[in-house]
Image: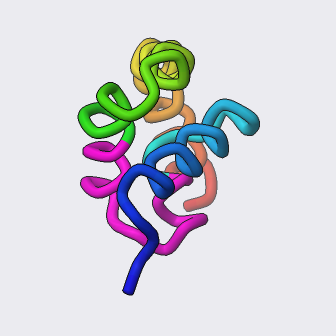
Amino acid sequence: MSKPLEERACELAVYMIETGATVRSTAKHYHISKSTVHKDISQRLEHYNPALYAQVREILEQNKRERHIRGGMATRKKYKGI
């Protein structure tokens, strides 16, 4: 049986805040799906711990603002290696 939802959501949030990790890298670190991580930190956490939710929201917004840059760098790396 997995951890209680509240505990898991808080643990994921703390990890993301401490490392500045993306949803994808957090999911990979905890061996769970991206959709589970996203649901935990964007929906469940808001009800369990609003203060932690506000901090995670900032990380998510920052990642959203930077994702086009990461995508461009990944494409560049892909074609530079060919």
Position in image of residue 76 (x %, y %)? 54, 39
Residue 13 appears anywhere in the view: yes
| Above-or-below relation of 6 to 65 | below
| Above-or-below relation of 53 to 48 | above
Q: Magenta-highlighted stretch: main secondary structure?
A: helix
Residue at coordinates 32% horizontally, 43% vertically from top-left? Answer: 38
Magenta segment: 25-40
| Above-or-below relation of 11 to 19 | below
Residue at coordinates 44% horizontally, 34% vertically from top-left? Answer: 71
Position in image of residue 5 (x %, y %)? 36, 57
Q: Which colour scheme is used?
A: rainbow
The quadrant of the image that shows the C terminus is: bottom right
Was residue 70 drawn as part of the magenta stretch in this picture? no
| Above-or-below relation of 59 to 39 | above
Position in image of residue 70 (x %, y %)? 52, 31
Q: Choose top left, top right, bottom left or bottom right for residue 60.
A: top left
Was residue 32 drawn as part of the magenta stretch in this picture? yes
Q: Which residue of the protein is positioned furthest toward the right in this rendering? A: 18
